[in-house]
Image: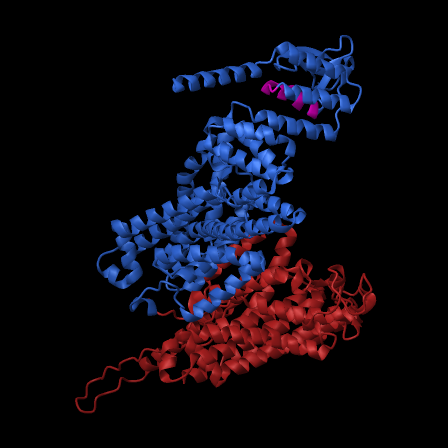
Chain colours: A red, B blue
Amino acid sequence: MITQRLFTGGSNRRVLVTALVLAAVAVLVPVLHLALPPSSPFHVPAYMVALVGKYLTYALLALALDLVWGYCGILSLGHGAFFALGGYAMGMYLMRQIGDRGVYGNPILPDFMVFLNWKELPWFWYGFDQFWFAAIMIVLAPGALAFVFGWFAFRSRVTGVYLSIITQALTYALLLAFFRNDMGFGGNNGLTDFKDILGFNVQAPETRAGLFAASALALALALLITSAITRSKYGMLMVAVRDAESRTRFIGWRPENIKVFAFTISAVMAGIAGALYVPQVGIINPGEFAPANSIEVVVWTAVGGRGTLVGPIIGALLVNGGKSWFTGILPEYWLFALGGLFIAVTLFLPKGIIGTWDSWRASRRDAAERARTKAEEDAAPPPVDPATGRPVRVEETPRAPSPGLSGGPAPQPAE
Amino acid sequence: MTVLRVLFVLVGLALSGAASAQVDDEAIRATIARFADSKNFRETEEIVRDLAATGDVRVERPLSALSDGNLSFRKSDRQVFIAPERGQTATLFDPLTGEAAGEAPKGDFTKVKVNNSLRRTIRDVISGLTLASPDPVVRLAAARTMFIAPDAANLEALDAAIAAETVTSVKISLEAARASTILVSDAPDAAKFDAIALLGQRGDRETLSLLTGFAARSQGDLQAAAQRAIDTIGKSLALWDIGQNIWYGISLGSVLLLAAIGLAITFGVMGVINMAHGEMVMIGAYTTFVVQSVIRSSFPGLFDWSLTIALPLAFLVAGAVGLALERGVIRFLYGRPLETLLATWGVSLILQQAVRTIFGPTNQEVGNPSWMSGGFQIGQLALTWNRLWIVVFALAVFGLLLYIFKRTAWGLQMRAVTANRRMASSMGIRTPWVDAFTFALGSGIAGIAGVALSQIDNVSPNLGQGYIIDSFMVVVFGGVGNLWGTLVGAFSLGIVNKFLEPYAGAVLGKILVLVLIILFIQKRPRGLFALKGRSVEA
């Protein structure tokens, strides 16, 4: 009964509406950008396309985090690592596309390798001149890392804050590693100065519009897929693991498998987000691995509402829009605002915007329903005990609170 | 009778020695005056050697002045002065006594010319002279100079100095200098074997390079002997290197201990991860900076006491911030550790930005008091005072916390809450109070860690960020709620880090340590010293 009410209700329709809106944006914005002259009031300027395109990849990252945090209770403070790995895979492809147009004109080696006096391409750069190979690596590199890491971590039952801390250590270790010049990923400067993607100029407005559309569509698709996952058996098991891991284990499921599954899927989504991010901003460097970045993703998700699929998307767009606006007018105070946001959301808005909206709606509906049933009860004559002829007191069954998917912080185990 | 004769001889020797040292001032002055008539470098060198031949320590002054290019003579009467020039005037000093002799325009004087070969002669001559100095420190320095740059001509002077030397440490240095001098002289092979044997026992890096040089230019048995000595020294140096690495590791470990121990307390007692812990360290460091600024501007004499004053202040300031944080934010988030983590991260951003706004984003200069600067040497081990004091300080803080935990009522309450919060509460322990003061204590400890770190690290708004992940690793590795775990965790991580560094480089070493910890958590998910019992399984 309860589950039925949850799944047929708002959340599913909201997902569909959001996906449709995203698809419409994917078509509309490029058309408005390319077809209309700059003088037209409906023209979307180029910087806006780039900016919103970037936000859409952030939203995809936040959605990925929501899958593990909101549904599976794994607070990953290292999702930026998967994002950056996907970005690096795309960056490597773009570097190889530069060919002999680099500063040093070397047809094989990227500029930084020539600069470091390397003679040949390291083995892990092979194949990145082909887009299909890069596309596989975009999925494979973050996915494999998440699978191995998750398999080790979840099998030995590392949970809660311990897990958060070692995911943070993971991204920190990768940050240090990618800063090294002899790792072969461009060190400090990262990969930049891209020219072409799939034969199109990265800087051209058409390519930018295309990348924007790809980001919006990827986000819409990811939203539908996550929605399908969360409504599947695995999705329900995820929630079960989140709310009562030991109980799920005692019933006979293997929580570690469910967690590894969620973690890997989420990492792949983050990797795709990173791959879409890199050609739009034109650079990928080790700074993306910084632990602070990963924690910022958590706040986007928290603001929008974890455990709601649409929430993280809204959160990412709102917080990043706010960041752009804020750093424009009061650059020094942005960190105050961000820090305050962290505190305010955890203290006053633990369910996030969407979650709070849902529980407000639910409580209003419940109130209305109670009022209606009460009115009906008052109108109907009280049931009479046939034996005694006296009115019988009806025990009002307490309505089960709807702990469900949309809303409610994960109940933490008692200490 | 015999005794009397020996005495007589000794007295005679002493007298003659004293007489030879007491060369007539006039003779030296006459020699110095000849600088004015010197035509070329060769003649100047002769005068230098003549001065040295007097054996009087005081000739060091004119010789050093000559080497520095400060020896001049007056054009009018060809009198020689030490005359350093500033602008258009020269300040005059007597060449022998160093007494000031007024000022004069620079144009009245001509410098005695000097070149590098002359400077080298002067250095050798001075080191030979200083062997006779009454000050043992000067003699030791001379012996070291002669040891590093041996010159066969000094051999006799060294023999004489060794015979006359009474201070043991200086004598050892002199003998080493003699051995290294023998190796460059044309002494018989037997003497060289002895010299190699003597040097082989020293085992420092300078001896190693000396012997390597000797082995390269000798042949046969001598070379083999030198090679053996080199191998011995190499082995002992390798051992010392391990010792040095352990020391660096202990030093890093003590820093980690200071940074992590407060975290371990709050994490252990409250199950709360305080991401703003690094910022408490930073607040402590900035408190030190403020204290030092006030002292510099108002009470310069108290500078050596600045750290002593800063310690309680840093504890109070950071503790107060911690208390405010607990009462204002964390209290509302109990039972929700992940959210606490996020909220404290927000606090850390705000604190960082606040410090950046107040003090600026650049590094602030925090000075070392005199008793913390410099260092000393044990064998081949180089120790600096500031690192040593920090190790001592970290252990003292650890001991104090251990005392609080094990011997005070408050510590008993903290342990009770750690073990079983509900039971402790039922027994009448006011758990909210314990929480608040534990948090304040942990933050205060972070504050005094900041005082210590300000001595060895840059004081900038990012100070805390550099330590936070390492501190977490220590806590995770050592286990929660156990001070000994933190101690062992901090020192083992520090030492492992420093041992990996020479082989893997600093960055790769750190990555390896992180990977090792991640693997370690597989084996022992609750750390090295896990709490036992039901309470942990939550």
- Residue reaching furthest bottom? A386
Q: Residue at x 68, y 19 (%)?
A: B50
Q: Residue at x 56, y 66 (%)?
A: A315
Image coordinates for residue B100, horizontal then vertical, percent: 63, 12
Of residues B132 and A149, which is closer to you in this image? B132
Within the magenta stretch, is there residue A62?
no
Of residues B477 and B82, which is closer to you in this image? B82
Is the residue B311 above or below the residue B224 in the image?
A: above
Within the magenta stretch, is there residue B62?
yes
Residue B344, can we see it? no
Residue B382, can we see it? yes
Q: Residue at x 22, y 57 (%)?
A: B428
Image coordinates for residue A312, horizontal then vertical, percent: 55, 69
Is the residue A176 above or below the residue A216 in the image?
A: above
The region drawn magenta spans B55-67
Is the residue B490 above or below the residue A259 in the image?
A: above
Residue A253, image quadrant: bottom left
B28 displayed left or right of A159: right
Tell me the quarter of the image containing the N terminus of chain A: bottom left
Image coordinates for residue A134, horizontal then vertical, percent: 69, 76
Of residues A307 and B521, which is closer to you in this image? B521
Residue A200, image quadrant: bottom right
Of residues B202 and B244, which is closer to you in this image? B202
Image coordinates for residue A316, horizontal then vertical, percent: 58, 66
